[in-house]
Structure formats: structure tokens, C-alpha cells
């Protein structure tokens, strides 16, 4: 089955040829679908087909900001067994996995700063000093330094979900990233609700919020590139959203191999499952 998306062909051709055409995409090649207009109609049959192929469906509000996420209930043949391993994971193991997660996140943040000529010696020291469970909360210390310097060309930027642009771009990009990670967790037979660190009782995607941390700097880098390109980033135009929707196919280096981000996330979640099963002790994260 394929998803058909009508598109107006605009070209200097006779009016006879300026008609609608149909593009087709194999449904198994679709990882994320974003519904960003309230007038979009999707049939139940299409939703069923997308979920059968492990696709994440994101819905947006009237401001076209992501507000909902739909995932398949069953994404792996041995899901029950993997659930048990995840539920029985010891606290020391979870703390070690969180330590590795924060180390990877800080190192990737440092790379973003380094690429802009910002001093990162302190960030690298903090990354090495992260202890089990990040007992010293070095993630917060690194974040304070990072957000103060990551947009040196902007005056007094402050990371706040409801803050001034480019916070709007970051919010949109992180929502897409979260959906990608949640989808990969389900496909690896894991519960995205049960985190290794995040444990908000009202959060249905605590594990997704954990695992996406080292991937956030990739979104940040894309936002930096959008701003430096001279594009108007004060609102989510069609052009800006199109660039943010390229997140699943961003180049990522993981375990010595270059892969699209969506495939790399699946590598990460597969390694996490093996950590829960006791096969390995290190979760695989990308290096920016």
C-alpha cells in the first residue's frame, strides 16, 4: 500500500498541463506523519495501515504546534519478554544508563559550541565527571552554559518553551524527535512510559524523554543552520517546517557508522533493550 499525496505542479507550461499529479510513497518507508492542518482528513484504514507499519502519527493544534502522538500498541514479536526485562531492571543499571546518556548529551552539546568557536573545555570536564545517576546534576550545569552560548548571534536568548524565537523552532523540532524516539522504543519492544530517569506520573513518554537527550543537539544544530541561512525564524512558515521535518534523515554517526537519524535512534533503542536483558552494559549513542 502507498500513501498518495496530491501536489499542484507549478511550471511555465500551457494551462492544459498545469494540473494535479499524484506522488506515491511505499508505506513501509514512512516513519513519521505530521498532521499540521485541522482540515486534514485521514481515514481509519490509512491510520491502521500506518500503525501496522510502525509509523508515528503526530497531530497539531490550531497554531500548528504538535500536541498529540499515536503509536502502535505492539511493535515487536517478543514484546512481553522485553517488557519483563525492562520492568525488572535494577536501580543501579538505570543509574548507569542515565550516566551514559548525560555524558553523551553533554559531549554533543560541546560539539555544537565548538563548531561556533566557543570554549568547551569545561563541558568536556563535566562530561567525564558525570557519576552514576548524575548525582551532581552536571546536566543542569552544562545546560546553563550551553544555552547561554549556543546562539552567540542572538541577544539575550533564554531557553523557555514559551519564550521568544527560536524557542518555537526548538519546540517543533523536539516534538518530532520525541515521536521518532517513541516509535523506535515501541519497535524495540520497550515501554516508552517507563523511564530510566524521568518519572513524571503524568508523562506517558518518560523513556522517550530520557533517550532523546543526546539527540537534542542535532535539532539545535539544525535550528542554528536555519537562523544563519537568513530565513525568517520568528514564525513557523512552511519553509521552516519543511527544514525541521528533515530531522529523521539527518546524518548521524553512531557506532562508527553513518546513518539517518531515525535509523540511528533504532540502533540506540535496540542496544537499550540488550542492556535490560544483560547482554551488554553500554547503550549506543551518536557522536555529533
Image (cartoon, rainbow, N blue to C red):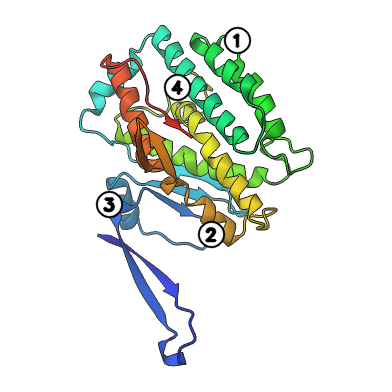
Question: Secondary structure under badge 2?
Answer: loop
Q: Residue furthest right?
A: 155
Q: For the residues marked 4 and 1, what is the alpha-carbon distance in whole angstroms?
A: 20 Å
The image shows residue 105 at horizontal and vertical percentages of 52, 26
Q: For the residues marked 3 and 1, what is the alpha-carbon distance in whole angstroms?
A: 44 Å
The residue singled out by tag 2 in the image is 37
Residue at image position (66%, 38%) is 161
Q: Are marks 2 and 4 in contact (CB under 8 Å)?
A: no
Label 1 or label 2, whichever lies nearer to me, is 1
Q: Is residue 202 visible?
A: no
Q: Residues within 10 Å of mark 3 (few under 14, many from 20)?
A: some
Residue at image position (55%, 25%) is 106
Place residue 162 in its image quadrant: top right
Place residue 260 in its image quadrant: top left
Q: Are marks 3 and 4 in contact (CB under 8 Å)?
A: no
Label 2 or label 4, whichever lies nearer to me, is 4
Of the image marks 3 and 1, the number of the one nearer the N terminus? 3
Q: Residues within 10 Å of mark 1 (few under 14, many from 20)?
A: few
Q: Residues within 10 Å of mark 2 (few under 14, many from 20)?
A: some
Residue at image position (70%, 53%) is 234
Say the numbered circle drawn on residue 195: 4
Question: Secondary structure under badge 1?
Answer: loop
The residue singled out by tag 3 in the image is 28
Residue at image position (45%, 40%) is 179
The residue singled out by tag 1 in the image is 136
Of the image marks 4 and 1, the number of the one nearer the N terminus? 1
Q: For the residues marked 3 and 4, what is the alpha-carbon distance in whole angstroms?
A: 28 Å
The image shows residue 170 at horizontal and vertical percentages of 60, 42
Q: Is residue 281 above or below residue 163?
A: above
Q: For the residues marked 3 and 2, what is the alpha-carbon distance in whole angstroms?
A: 24 Å
Of the image marks 2 and 4, the number of the one nearer the N terminus? 2
Question: Secondary structure under badge 4?
Answer: loop
Amino acid at each position: 500500500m502507498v500513501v498518495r499525496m496530491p501536489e499542484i505542479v507549478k511550471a511555465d507550461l500551457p494551462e492544459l498541463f498545469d494540473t494535479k499529479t499524484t506522488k506515491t510513497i511505499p508505506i513501509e518507508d514512512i516513519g513519521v506523519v505530521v498532521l499540521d492542518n485541522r482540515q486534514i482528513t485521514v481515514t481509519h484504514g490509512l491510520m491502521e495501515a500506518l500503525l501496522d507499519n510502525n509509523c508515528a502519527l503526530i497531530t497539531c493544534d490550531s497554531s500548528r504546534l504538535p500536541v498529540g502522538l499515536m503509536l502502535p500498541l505492539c511493535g515487536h514479536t517478543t514484546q512481553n519478554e522485553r517488557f519483563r526485562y525492562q520492568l525488572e531492571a535494577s536501580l543501579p543499571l538505570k543509574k548507569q544508563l542515565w550516566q551514559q546518556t548525560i555524558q553523551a548529551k553533554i559531549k554533543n552539546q560541546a560539539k555544537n559550541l565548538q563548531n561556533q568557536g566557543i570554549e568547551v573545555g569545561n563541558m568536556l570536564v563535566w562530561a567525564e565527571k558525570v557519576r552514576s545517576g548524575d548525582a551532581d546534576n552536571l546536566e543542569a550545569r552544562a545546560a546553563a552554559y550551553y544555552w547561554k552560548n549556543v546562539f552567540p548571534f542572538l541577544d539575550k536568548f533564554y531557553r523557555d518553551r514559551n519564550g521568544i524565537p527560536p524557542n518555537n523552532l526548538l519546540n517543533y523540532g523536539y516534538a518530532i524527535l520525541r515521536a521518532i524516539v517513541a516509535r523506535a522504543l515501541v519497535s524495540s519492544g520497550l515501554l516508552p512510559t517507563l523511564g530510566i530517569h524521568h518519572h513524571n506520573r503524568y508523562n506517558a513518554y518518560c523513556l522517550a524523554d530520557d533517550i532523546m537527550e543526546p539527540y537534542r543537539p542535532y535539532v539545535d544544530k539544525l535550528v542554528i543552520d536555519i537562523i544563519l541561512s537568513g530565513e525568517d525564524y520568528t514564525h513557523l512558515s512552511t519553509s521552516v517546517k519543511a527544514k525541521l521535518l528533515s530531522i529523521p534523515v539527518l546524518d548521524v554517526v553512531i557506532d562508527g557508522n553513518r546513518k539517518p537519524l531515525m535509523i540511528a535512534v533504532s540502533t540506540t533503542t535496540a542496544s537499550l533493550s540488550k542492556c535490560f536483558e544483560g547482554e551488554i552494559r553500554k547503550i549506543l549513542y551518536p557522536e555529533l
